[in-house]
Amino acid sequence: MKSIFKYAAVAFGSALVALWIFGKTQPTTPSYQQPTAQVVNTSFSPTKTVVPALSTDFTNAAEKTIDAVVHITNKGMVKSRQPNSIWDFFYGSPMREYPRIGMGSGVIVSENGYIITNNHVIEGASELEVTTNDNKAYEAELIGSDENADIAVLKIKGDQSFPYVRFANSDLTRVGEWVLAVGNPFNLNSTVTAGIISAKSRDLNDYDNQNQSFIQTDAAVNSGNSGGALVNLDGDLIGINTAISSNGMGTFIGYSFAVPSNIARKIYEDILEYGNVQKALLGVSGGGLNARTAEELGIEETEGFYVGGVDESMGAANAGIKENDVIIRVDNAKIRRFADLTGYLGSKRPGEVVNVTYIRDGEEITVPVTLMRTPYVNYYGMQLRNLTKDEAKAFGLKNGIMVSAVENRRLYNRGIKNGDVLLSINGNKLSNVQDVEDLDENYIYEVEFMNEEKEKMRFIFE
C-alpha cells in the first residue's frame, strides 16, 4: 500500500515539474517594428534610368510614302532554245525570241515624274509601264542607268504632277533605327514592312569588281520589291531596296540590302545633268584591314583602308599619300573597311576636295585631296587610258592610248599585253580614250597596236 502511494506521489510531482517547465519555454509572439530608412552619403548624383520609348507608329511614314512608290512592268524579248515541237527534241531547238515580262518597284523623287529604280528591274526592256497606287498606268522612258551601282532613272511620259518622296541624308542613319520598306512584292501592290537597320557599308562580295556599300535591314523584302523605297520614320528616302539574302528560292530569309540614298541621289543628279555618272576617285588601290591581313602586313591597325598602290596622276599622290599608309577617315566618315571608303566616295563628284586622315608610322596625318574622274575606259575587253607626255615621247607619238589591262582572249592570245599602245580601230586613228567611246565595240574587224619595242601589230578579224 505504501508503495502505491509512493509511486503516485512521485508521478504527481513529476507532472507538476513538467507543467512548470512547459510554461517557461512557451514561445512568445514577436513584435515587429517598421524599419526606418537609412541615409547614406554618396559622392555622385543618380541618373535617370527610365528613357521614353521611341514611337513605333509607322502610319505617318507609310502615308507619306505609299503613293510615291510605283509598280514597274518591263516588257521585252528573250532569246532561248526552248523546244516548240517533237522535232526540236530530236534535232535540237533553234534560237528563238520569246516575249518576257519582268516586274519590280520604283520611287518617284520629283513632282514631274522622275523615278529611281534598280538597273536589273528595267534591263533589256523594250517597253516600260508604270502603275501608281491609284491603279493608273503610264508609259515611261529610260533616262540613264549605272550597272555597277544597280541604279536606273526613268521618266513618266506626260506633264502630270505626282506625289514624291524627299531624299534624306543616308550618312546620318544609325544601326538600330526603325525603317520601312515599301514596294510591290509578288505583285501585291503598295506593301509596307517594318524593321531596323542591321548594318551599314555592307559589301556582299569582297572579291568581285563591284564597289558595294549597302544598308542592311531586317525589313521583309521579296521578289518585286527591287527598286522600292527604304524610308525613315519621317517618310524620307534613305535607300533603294536592291537585294535580299535568300536560300536560292528568291524569298526573304532575314536580311535585305538597299543602295544608300546619297549614292542613288548622286547618280540620279549626274544622269540628269551630265547624261552619265561622274565617278570620283582618290587614286589609290588596296583593301580593307582585319586581324589576319594586319598580321600578314606586319602592322598594328586592324581597321581602315590599307594603301597598296598609288596612281601618280591622281589626287592622292599629289597630296602625299603613299603605299603602306592606312586611311582611317575621310571628312567625318570613319573608314573601317573598303565599303566605307567606296560608299562615301560614291556620293562625291570629280573636282570636290575631301580631307583624308591616314596613319603613317603610328602618326595620324590629315591632308586635303582633290577627287578626280577615273582615267580608265573599259572597251573591247581592254582597260585603256591616255598616254602621259613622257610615255608618248618614249613611243615617238604626239599622243595615244595605253593598254593597262587585257581581258579579251582574242587579243591576249595574239600577244597584246599591258604597256602596248592602241593606235587604230577599223582604220580610225585614235588619239585619246574619248575616241574609242564613239566606236561600236560589237563591230570590230581590224585593230592596230604598237608594242614597247615600237613594233606595229595589225590584226584582222573575220
Image (tube, rainbow, N blue to C red):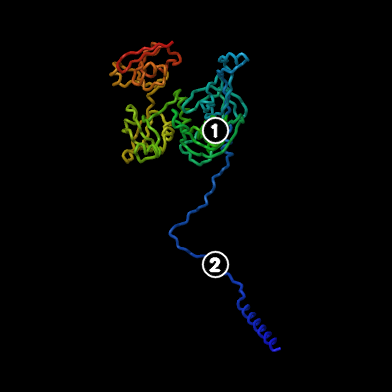
Res 59 quadrant in image: top right
- Circle 1 Cα neighbour tier, 10 Å, few/some/many (<14 / 14–19 / ≥20): some
Which secondary structure, mark 1? Answer: loop
Earlier along the polypeptide chain: callout 2 or callout 1? Answer: 2
Is the residue 390 above or below the residue 183 in the image? above
Residue at 28% in and 19% down: 394
Please identify, in this view, whether the residue under mark 2 or under mark 1 is nearer the observer: 1
Q: Picture coordinates of residue 206 (x, y %)?
A: 44, 32
Please tell me which residue lies in front, 287 or 179. Answer: 287
User: Which residue bears the numbered disc 1?
Assistant: 246
Q: Is residue 230 left or right of residue 432?
A: right
Which secondary structure, mark 2? Answer: loop
Q: Can residue 261 be seen in this view?
A: no
Task: Find out whether the residues at labels 2 and 1 contact each other: C-beta distance under 8 Å.
Answer: no
Q: Please state, as top left, top right, bottom left or bottom right, where the C terminus lies in the image.
A: top left
Is the residue 294 above or below the residue 52 in the image? above
Q: Picture coordinates of residue 110 (x, y %)?
A: 52, 29
- Circle 2 Cα neighbour tier, 10 Å, few/some/many (<14 / 14–19 / ≥20): few
Q: Picture coordinates of residue 413 (x, y %)?
A: 39, 17
Q: In this view, does 396 lie to the left or right of 217?
A: left
Please tell me which residue lies in front, 31 or 418. Answer: 418
Please tell me which residue lies in front, 390 or 139. Answer: 390
Residue at 38% in and 31% down: 352
Is the residue 86 above or below the residue 280 in the image? above
* Amino acid at circle 1: Ser
Q: Is residue 165 visible?
A: yes
Residue at 67% in and 87% down: 6
* Amino acid at circle 2: Pro
- C-alpha span from label 2 to label 1: 62 Å
Q: Please state, as top left, top right, bottom left or bottom right, where the N terminus lies in the image.
A: bottom right
Q: Picture coordinates of residue 363 (x, y %)?
A: 32, 41
User: Which residue bears the numbered disc 2?
Assistant: 35
